[in-house]
Amino acid sequence: MRMIFIGPPGAGKGTQATALVQRYGIPHISTGDMLRAAVAAKTELGVKVEAVMNSGQLVGDDLMVGLVKERIAAPDAAKGFLLDGFPRTVPQAKALTDAGVQLDVVLLLEVPDDLLASRVTGRRKDPETGTIYHLQFDPPSADIAHRLVQRDDDTEVKVRERLGAYHAQTAPIVPIYEEAGLLLRIDGVGSPSEVAGRIGAALDRHTNR
Ligand code: AP5
């Protein structure tokens, strides 16, 4: 199963990816997580992309395409993958097609802009387990609350920048996948389990058609 997850910042892509990769036994390839790991490790890549990420803008296409091509060529991705956060521009989508990558499905998680800011600013991560929480919608237990961290780009101002980049540069890839008959639109409003139910039902219909 070769899947792509598209959606605005805070739509719930990372949250929903966990169950999906378990269901299909495929790796979760999040370009945001890959870049954040590079920044934290202060690698050459991390030093290059840190300022762009902190501004809420997108990292250059050539760099991202090279990174993803290398990652999906790894042995654990031979039977499939869930790409979360890539492609994010029309040139990135074209590069994937030109590389001969055959996709099975593209999930578009739709959430109105006015719900996204609170989802993003309330997000916290447990650095020990990698679990994502939300201060209001999915609060952590009191014994771990002290160790949770917030992403540098999860502020009101940067969310607006990221949403601007999404509408200007990422939304134009949606028609490409719609015309190819690969796109499943998922209503991302509701509890995470309600959204997971919709994704599961849509995937069942898609694979049984
Ligand atoms: P990236 O890490 O990909 O960030 P993003 O796309 O902005 O997505 P998020 O991680 O913010 O949101 P999500 O949809 O995963 O939400 P989550 O499930 O955590 O990219 C970061 C940066 O890296 C970019 O800005 C760019 O600079 C760079 N980059 C990455 N890929 C690139 C590329 N291909 N090209 C160029 N640049 C690239 O949920 C959010 C919160 O809401 C959580 O707290 C969660 O608990 C909560 N929540 C989830 N679902 C629900 C629900 N149903 N109800 C209530 N709360 C919910």
Image (cartoon, helix red, strand yellow):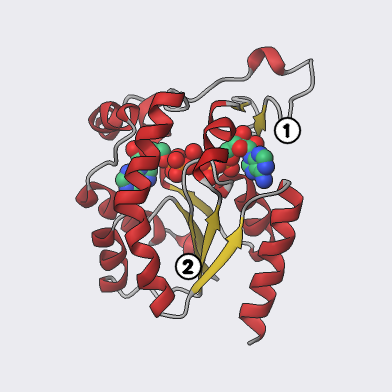
Mark 2 surroundings: few (<14), some (14-19) or many (≥20) residues within 10 A: few
Question: Badge 1 is on which residue?
Answer: 138
Q: Outermost residue toward the front?
A: 114
Quadrant of the snapshot with the C terminus = bottom right
Residue 44 vs 82, above or below: the answer is: above
Which three-letter amino acid code belongs to the residue tagged 1? Asp
Q: Are dots 2 and 1 in contact, CB under 8 Å?
A: no
Q: Secondary structure beneath disc 2?
A: loop
Image point 55% across, 66% down: which residue?
185
Q: Earlier in the sequence, mark 2 or mark 1?
A: 2
Instruction: Residue 40: name its quadrant.
Output: top left
In this view of the protein, can residue 202 be seen by the observer?
yes
Name which residue lies at 24% across and 31% down: 44
CA distance for labels 2 and 1: 34 Å
Which type of secondary structure does the marked residue at label 1 adopt?
loop
Of badges 2 and 1, the one in the foreground is: 1
Q: Left or right? Give the position of 3 relative to 125.
A: left
Q: Look at the image and tell me whether residue 33 can be seen.
A: no
Query: Horizontal placement of 65 versus 73: left or right?
Result: left
Q: Of the residues shown, which amino acid type is indicated by label 2?
A: Ala
Is the residue indicated by label 1 positioned so its CB lies within 8 Å of ligand 1?
A: yes
Q: Residue at x 23, y 47 (%)?
A: 63
In the rendered image, residue 20, in percent from the top left (x then y), is placed at 64, 58
Horizontal and vertical percent position of residue 42: 32, 24
Could you tell me residue 54's position as x and y percent?
A: 34, 26
Location of residue 126 (image quadrant): top right
Residue 84, horizontal then vertical, whole percent: 48, 52
Q: Can you tell which mark lies on residue 78?
A: 2
Left or right: residue 87 versus residue 124 is: left
Given residues 78 and 150, the one toward you in this image is 150
Q: Residue at x 60, y 62 (%)?
A: 186
Q: Is residue 9 left or right of residue 119?
A: left
